[in-house]
Image: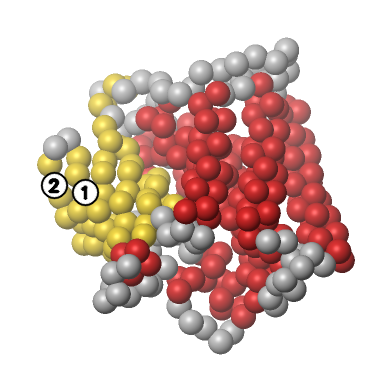
Amino acid sequence: MRSLIFLCILSLVFSSTSQNLIEQGSTGKINKKRLIISNSSIGLVSSVSLIGLHRLWYSEEKQEAFHLFDDSKNWMQMDKMGHVMSSYELSKNMTEVYQWAGMSKRSSALLASSISLAYMSAIEIMDGHSTNWGFSISDMVANIAGTGWFLFQESFFSKQIFQPKFSFHQTVYAEMRPQVLGNNFMESLLKDYNGQTYWISFSPGQLGMKKWPKWMMISLGHSIDARLKGNSSNFMGYESHREYLFSLDLDLAQIQMKSRFLKSLLKVINCVKIPFPAIVITKGTFNISPVYF
């Protein structure tokens, strides 16, 4: 999960800049100057983040020959959902950067997705040389799934209808294992999978239901509870289980704003699920949360 910190930062950088670029409009043909700027910016941010990641974490890890590591059953696949969302967001936001440079939507999507997958692969290769970790095939499958999800929608819908979202709330489990699940809010945000929820949000209004507002979304979520150890379903007397959720959400990108800054801000936070009442299905029972985040 430590590597996803940089993926989140990278996504936010591209997300905040791409909206401003798209607002300026595409030229309809490749603008060489803009293409140079796009390539240079993406190359610089990617390189700096990878170097920073290596120096902050991997340089302190014991290194050995490249090897595989099977973590497919750890944390009930919540970390894989993080990889899916990260690769999706990187592909989506870099696509907009290349559209600004004048590339066609299809070419932009293919190039951006290729760069996103290469970036994620570089992180996995660094993991592959770390003694305590290793190259995770399941992580790579999740990375491919994220870029594939983006490309499929671009090809089939010509827009992103089914959007991944993220929400988080603090849990009592971090207090029990702070070194594993986080000593504070920011650490728990990245480490405590019990507090994370990954959603798929979509608007029926964008699927042909004319009377449904395009900004109002239906959201389906997945979370876990009582998972204190990655590869153990029963630890310290707590038996972990999955949670499935049904809620509403807002597509902030559909809200019309005159301010370019506010448009950019809404686009950046649009990957976060808006708090709403939710139906929570856990262990075969239905519960209603007045406000779920």
Which of the 4 image quarters holds residue 135?
A: top right
Query: In the image, is residue 95 above or below residue 22?
Result: above
Of 220 and 29, nearer the camera is 29
Q: What residue type is labelled 1?
A: Val
In this image, 261 relative to 169: left or right?
right
Quarter of the figure that contains the N terminus: top right
Q: What element carries label 2?
A: strand
Name the residue: 62% across, 80% down.
Answer: 260
The secondary element bearing badge 1 is classed as strand
* Residue occupying the point 26% across, 41% down: 243
> How dense is the environment of label 2, judged by Cα within 10 Å: few (below 14), some, or many (20 and up)?
few
Q: Residue 261 carries which label?
A: none
**Within the image, what quadrant is residue 95 found in?**
bottom right
Q: Are the residues flagged by discs 2 and 1 in contact, CB closer than 8 Å? A: yes
Q: Please give the label number shown on residue 286.
A: 2
Q: Which residue is drawn at 37% across and 72% down?
A: 214
Residue 201 relative to residue 98: left or right = left
Q: Which colour scheme is used?
A: secondary structure
Q: How crowded is mark 1: few (under 14 residues within 10 Å), some or many (20 or more)?
A: many
Q: Compared to 259, does 110 lie above or below? A: above
Q: Which residue is drawn at 37% across and 33% down?
A: 176
Point out residue 60 in the picture as x, y percentages from the top left corner: 72, 27
Q: Where is residue 226 in the image (x, y as percent from the top left)?
A: 30, 33
Going by the numbered disc 2, the residue's amino acid type is Phe
- Please name the residue that numbered disc 1 is placed on: 280
Residue sitting nearer the eye, 31 or 96: 31
**Nearest to N terminus: mark 2 or mark 1:** 1
Residue 92 seen in this snapshot: yes
Q: Quadrant of the C terminus?
A: bottom left
Q: Residue furthest left?
A: 285
Residue 85 in view here: no
Q: Position of residue 91 (x, y in %)?
A: 61, 50
